[in-house]
């Protein structure tokens, strides 16, 4: 991190980990010998474009997260992802903010730096999302019967981190409770508010840990990247 950096990073880390069967917050689940959250914190520490980090922690685990997060600011997460991000944004003092999921431990520091630099240099862009072109054939089905094959040439699998003009994201988060609760990512809220959202192509491994199988894959990739 750098004191004169471009952006503040927000880590959404308040997820319960129910689908993972974690028995506790997903951010604290061990992957390759460290909590999932620790991998993102390390990447952000090495990112020159990030000046501050704010972690939205699982309620009741704030002190444990603070002990791990070092100089990062820790706030209590909300009942939804959007509520957690909105709370964390109150601590941001930069014109650009990056939002990342603690459940994506493979995002490297250069991805954070690239997104911060790209959105800072594009005045017309209000949101920039890391994304990979969809490779699988996609079909729409109803009651188990295929209705159509969906063209994939214009489809992207969106990831985090996602970069935003802070003001644009704050305005997008000022939506009704139903919209906030149903949002699966922050960029969709900016899009719904009429903002310009662009994709930043990223095809390196950056999976989201949701299931035990995902965790096993993430652990293997982390151990391959950091053999020691």
Image (cartoon, rainbow, N blue to C red):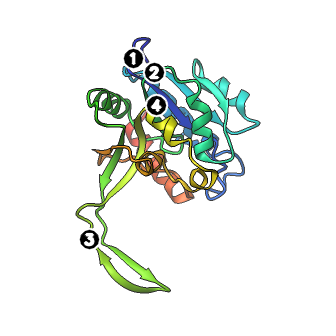
Q: Is residue 48 above or below residue 88?
A: above
- Mark 2 to mark 3 CA distance (whole Å): 39 Å
Comes first in the chain, label 3 or label 1: 1
Tag 4 near tag 2, CB within 8 Å: no
- Check disc 2 and report the residue beneath it: 94
Q: Which dot, 4 or 3, sits closer to the camera? A: 4
| Mark 2 vs 1, N-terminal side | 1
Of label 4 and label 1, which has the lower sequence position? 1
Provide the residue designation for mark 4.
167
Looking at the image, the residue that sits furthest to the right is 60
Mark number, residue 5: 1
In the displayed structure image, the side of residue 161 where residue 121 appears, left or right: left
- Residue beneath label 3, please? 151
Disc 2 vs disc 1: Cβ atoms closer than 8 Å?
yes
Q: Is residue 216 above or below residue 148?
A: above
Q: Residue at x 38, y 38 (%)?
A: 225
């Amino acid at each position: 991190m750098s004191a004169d950096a471009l952006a503040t990073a927000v880590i959404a880390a308040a997820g319960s980990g129910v689908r993972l069967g974690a028995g506790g917050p997903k951010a604290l689940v061990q992957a390759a010998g460290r909590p999932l959250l620790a991998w993102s914190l390390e990447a952000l520490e090495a990112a020159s474009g990030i000046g501050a980090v704010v972690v939205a922690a699982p309620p009741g685990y704030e002190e444990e997260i603070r002990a791990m997060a070092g100089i990062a600011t820790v706030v209590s997460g909300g009942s939804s992802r959007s509520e957690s991000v909105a709370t964390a944004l109150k601590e941001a003092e930069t014109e650009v903010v990056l939002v990342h999921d603690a459940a994506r431990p493979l995002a490297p520091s250069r991805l954070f730096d690239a997104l911060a630099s790209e959105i800072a240099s594009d005045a017309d862009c209000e949101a920039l999302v890391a994304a990979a072109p969809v490779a699988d054939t996609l079909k729409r089905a109803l009651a188990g019967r295929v209705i159509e094959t969906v063209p994939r040439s214009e489809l992207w699998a969106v990831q985090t981190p996602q970069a935003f003009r802070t003001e644009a994201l704050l305005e997008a988060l000022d939506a009704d409770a139903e919209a906030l609760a149903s949002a699966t990512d922050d960029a969709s809220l900016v899009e719904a508010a009429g903002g310009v959202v662009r994709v930043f192509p990223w095809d390196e491994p950056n999976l989201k840990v949701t299931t035990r199988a995902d965790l096993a894959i993430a652990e293997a990739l982390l151990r391959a990247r950091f053999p020691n």
